[in-house]
Image (tube, helix red, strand yellow):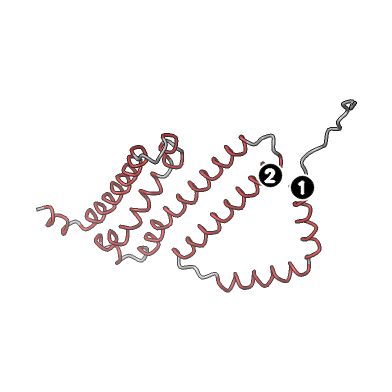
Amino acid sequence: MLIQWLHVNPIAHGGLILLFGTFLGYALYLALIKIARGGTSVSPSTAESPALRRIWLPMILTTIAIFADDAINRAGLREYFWWEEFLALLQSLPVIAWIWQLVTICRFYFSRLTDQHTEETNVVHSMALVSNLITMLLIVGGGYVLLRVWSLDLSPLLTSAGLVTAVGALAARDSLSDFFGGITIFLDYSGPQIPDNSIRW
């Protein structure tokens, strides 16, 4: 009875597939939380960490994206001209969600580490640089994956940008060396030295 009804209503069939993907993603999230809380090698603070609390949405969107192609096929949406864009949109959402959550988690943990070393200026600046570098790498990697999802080929543009960057780096190598030298001096600077005025006998 249900199978016949699904054959008659293909849109509902596709919707049920996406709904199953939603429940599967949430079930995986709950299973991960249960494993983290019940594992002997995992501390309670790890089980309650923001990293685990924040990943429910990316996991659900990931499972939906996995079942999206089959859902579109079952729903008969391939007859419409916009089905490829709709599929790319469903596959782009988990990428955006993962990048957003990873950047947020990275910023959160680096801010905690910075709060623990507020008196060490060099450590604070180094952590800020590492945090910004990781954020940049995550955004660039996510952008590359999104370009692949939408089948956008930017290799000619990237090649031209690489040539321009190489020419600009050669032309400004003295300025760049001064810039990075200044960063090195800034990181090595430990603050003003307080003179020792104590009387030595």
Q: Are marks 2 and 1 in contact (CB under 8 Å)?
A: yes
Decide: is 20 above or below 51: below
The x, y position of residue 84, in whole percent, is: 37, 64
Report the side of 125 relative to 108 (left or right): right
Q: Earlier in the sequence, mark 2 or mark 1?
A: 2
The x, y position of residue 59, in whole percent, is: 37, 49
Decide: is 199 above or below 56: above
Report the side of 63 relative to 145 (left or right): left
> Disc 2 to disc 1, how far (Cα)?
9 Å
Give the number of callouts: 2
The x, y position of residue 49, in whole percent, is: 45, 38
Residue 120 tag number: none
Residue shown at 13%/56% (left/top)? 3
Could you say which is closer to the camera, residue 164 or residue 152? 164
Residue wearing tag 2: 125
SS state under label 2: helix
Residue shown at 35%/48% (left/top)? 60
Amino acid tagged 2: His
Tell me if mark 1 has few (under 14), some (14-19) or many (20+) residues whose alpha carbon lies within 10 angstroms of its own: some
The x, y position of residue 47, in whole percent, is: 40, 38
Residue shown at 75%/52% (left/top)? 184
Residue wearing tag 1: 186
In the rendered image, which quarter contains the C terminus?
Answer: top right
Tell me if mark 2 has few (under 14), some (14-19) or many (20+) residues whose alpha carbon lies within 10 angstroms of its own: some
